[in-house]
């Protein structure tokens, strides 16, 4: 009986404490988000402090990097009211913004604490290279991170392949991409298709069909779900680029015929140029600007699209 | 030998009575909770993280048991004055120290064996439903027998730490013994710095002293193969054998000094 009374009293007191906390939060709302800070930015210092537990501390930094990347990306997404178009614009590195500023230091600490943390290099490179606001828009740091991984595992062809992709996809440096594909192909255990990627890149770098071929190869061959999803996203972006080109041709034809850009998609549906409001491969309607330019909606899950080199650009 | 065995069994029973094995429940809860949460917190490497967490928890839990029970093995008997009735029995003081040490080593071995089993169960659960082609991309398989090498070396390291704790407890207070044991544990993991100290100081004498300490103080870093095992790197059998032999010699040294110090103590 006495025990039961004690339990009841304890539960009542606990409920009272929770209630008081709720009242305090209602009267004095807590800040929505705390500023992310890194108290220790030196990878060497963190390694010293963590001593024999460095691998677990590396895991904690990796989880923090993932949360930081995911949280920042969500905050910047237009669906959350984020300013996705600030900085130097989609596809370009925006050195003045600091919204992914802690990403590289976190990845650097993770990989210093555990130099063989494979996924931290590979996923981290994607987070860094991805165009702003979906990523840090820093392909240079992505390459730096992967090269750090290669210092510990010089025969890791996957890192070489990733470096080649960063050069190809984000820097449009097809010669460097081709060289890294070739280097990867020479590593022990490398798949045969790296050599054909090197040849394709050298011959047809920047060609949309070649890009599609590369991402399709990755999609079919990778066993890592995140990398497969990334390849699928890139393939959908390429499809969106094709669709935008086709829509632009249709809009241009109407504009040439009527002398004015169509006001909206509905007017094109009425004249039977289109069968319905065109949507991108993720289901978000394409936008038609007042000047007749067709573009992807900034609220699309495919936004921002890759920046393609202007046709006729000389290959580096 | 019978006396040592009897004392050891008694220490093990006492630790069970003192609910030392409750830490196993905490360990199991920690691993199970982590395995359920980890997928939400990270992208990939779940199994690696669980292995890191399991090995680190094994090491930390074991360290606390080794230090906090190790320092009380002898001092508690003195404090409770039960040392008089013990020494009145047909056992020598050295048998008492070695028996106490063996008992705690047995407690640690049982603890770590159960933790290892729990870790394998959680890893088997995490591996459930993972296609073999995905598992092939991991550095090491989920159910990896090599994990036992890391766990065995953790046990060996903890046995050495226990010997350090017993050594200090034979002549010092429990609080000071705990502080000194933790200090040696930390120094033991950074002993490589002592070896290279002469490259960062100008005085050759200081460099030589640091180098001397490197050879004298216990080198615990050699027992840490967690990262290698988790990444599927082979730990050579020769390496393990030499590390175990080093621990055996060092434990023998510490127990010899401990029994010698304890034999000279006056309990009047």
Image (cartoon, coloured by chain):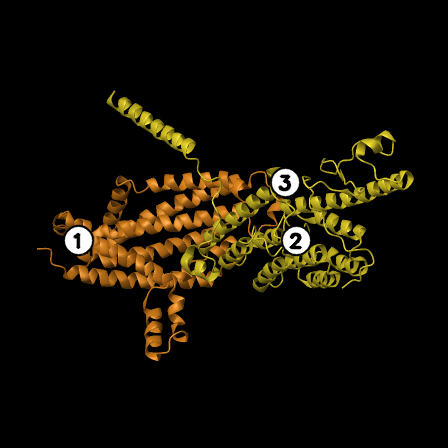
- Which numbered circle lies on residue A78? 3
State which chain is coloured yellow: A
Element under disc 3: helix
Instruction: Identify the image quadrant of residue A249.
Output: top right
Q: Nearer the viewer, residue A210 or B130?
A: A210
Asked whether the viewer can see residue B1, the reply is: no
Q: Rounded to the nearest whole Å, what is the CA distance between mark 2 and mark 1?
A: 82 Å
Q: Rounded to the nearest whole Å, what is the CA distance between mark 3 and mark 1?
A: 79 Å
Point out the image quarter for the N terminus of chain B. Answer: bottom left
The 10 Å Cα crowd at callout 2, few under 14, some 14 to 19, many 20 or more, is few
Element under disc 1: loop
Mark count: 3
Residue that sits furthest to the left in the current view: B268
Residue that sits furthest to the front in the current view: A259
Vertical relation: A39 (above or below) A186: above
- Which numbered circle lies on residue B91? 1
Q: Rounded to the nearest whole Å, what is the CA distance between mark 3 and mark 2?
A: 17 Å
> Where residue A171 sits in the image (x, y, percent)?
70, 58
- The chain letter under disc 2 is A
The 10 Å Cα crowd at callout 1, few under 14, some 14 to 19, many 20 or more, is some
Q: Nearer the viewer, residue A218 or B115?
A: A218
- The chain letter under disc 3 is A
> Where residue B10 sits in the image (x, y, percent)?
24, 45
* Residue positioned 22% across, 60% down in the render: B258
């Amino acid at each position: 009986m006495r025990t039961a009374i004690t339990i009841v009293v304890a539960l009542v007191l606990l409920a009272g404490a929770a209630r008081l906390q709720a009242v305090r939060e209602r009267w004095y709302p807590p800040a929505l988000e705390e500023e992310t800070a890194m108290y220790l930015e030196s990878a060497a210092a963190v390694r010293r402090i963590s001593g024999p537990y460095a691998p677990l501390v590396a895991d904690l930094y990796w989880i923090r990097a993932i949360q930081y990347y995911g949280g920042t990306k969500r905050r910047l997404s237009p669906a959350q009211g984020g300013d996705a178009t600030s900085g130097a614009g989609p596809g370009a590195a925006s050195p003045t913004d600091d919204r992914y500023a802690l990403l590289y230091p976190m990845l650097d600490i993770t990989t210093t604490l555990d130099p063989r943390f494979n996924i931290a290099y590979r996923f981290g490179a994607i987070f860094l290279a991805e165009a702003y606001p979906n990523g840090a828009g820093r392909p240079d740091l992505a390459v730096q991170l992967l090269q750090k991984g290669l210092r510990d595992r010089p025969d890791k062809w996957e890192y070489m392949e990733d470096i080649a992709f960063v050069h190809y996809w984000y820097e449009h440096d097809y010669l460097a991409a081709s060289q890294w594909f070739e280097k990867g192909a020479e590593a022990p255990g490398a798949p045969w298709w790296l050599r054909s990627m090197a040849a394709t890149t050298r011959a047809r770098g920047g060609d949309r069909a070649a890009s599609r071929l590369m991402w399709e190869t990755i999609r079919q061959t990778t066993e890592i779900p995140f990398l497969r999803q990334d390849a699928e996203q890139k393939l959908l972006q390429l499809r969106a680029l094709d669709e935008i080109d086709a829509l632009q041709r249709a809009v241009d034809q109407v504009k040439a015929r009527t002398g004015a850009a169509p006001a909206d998609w509905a007017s094109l549906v009425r004249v039977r140029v289109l069968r319905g409001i065109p949507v991108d491969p993720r289901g978000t309607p394409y936008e038609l600007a007042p000047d007749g330019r067709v573009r992807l909606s900034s609220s699309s899950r495919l936004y921002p699209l890759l920046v393609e080199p202007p046709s006729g650009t000389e290959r580096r | 030998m019978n006396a040592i065995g009897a004392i050891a069994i008694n220490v093990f029973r006492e630790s069970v009575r003192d609910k030392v094995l409750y830490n196993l429940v905490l360990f199991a809860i920690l691993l199970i909770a982590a395995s359920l949460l980890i997928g939400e917190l990270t992208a990939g490497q779940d199994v690696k993280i669980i292995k890191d967490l399991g090995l680190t928890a094994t090491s930390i839990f074991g360290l606390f048991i080794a230090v906090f029970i190790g320092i009380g093995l002898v001092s508690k008997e003195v404090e409770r004055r039960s040392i008089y009735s013990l020494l009145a029995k047909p056992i020598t003081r050295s048998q008492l120290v070695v028996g106490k040490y063996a008992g705690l080593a047995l407690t640690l071995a049982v603890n770590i064996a159960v933790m290892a089993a729990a870790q394998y169960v959680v890893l088997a659960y995490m591996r459930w439903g993972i296609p073999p082609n995905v598992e092939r991309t991991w550095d090491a398989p989920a159910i990896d027998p090599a994990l036992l090498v890391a766990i065995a070396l953790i046990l060996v390291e903890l046995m050495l730490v226990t010997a350090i704790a017993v050594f200090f407890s034979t002549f010092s207070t429990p609080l000071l013994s705990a502080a000194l044991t933790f200090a040696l544990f930390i120094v033991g993991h950074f002993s490589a710095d002592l070896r290279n100290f002469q490259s960062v100081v100008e005085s050759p004498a200081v460099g030589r002293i640091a180098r001397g300490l490197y050879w004298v103080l216990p080198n615990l870093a050699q027992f840490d193969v967690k990262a290698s095992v988790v990444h599927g790197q082979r730990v050579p059998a020769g390496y393990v054998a030499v590390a175990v032999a080093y621990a055996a010699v060092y434990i023998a040294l510490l127990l010899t000094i401990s029994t010698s110090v304890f034999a000279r103590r006056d309990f009047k």
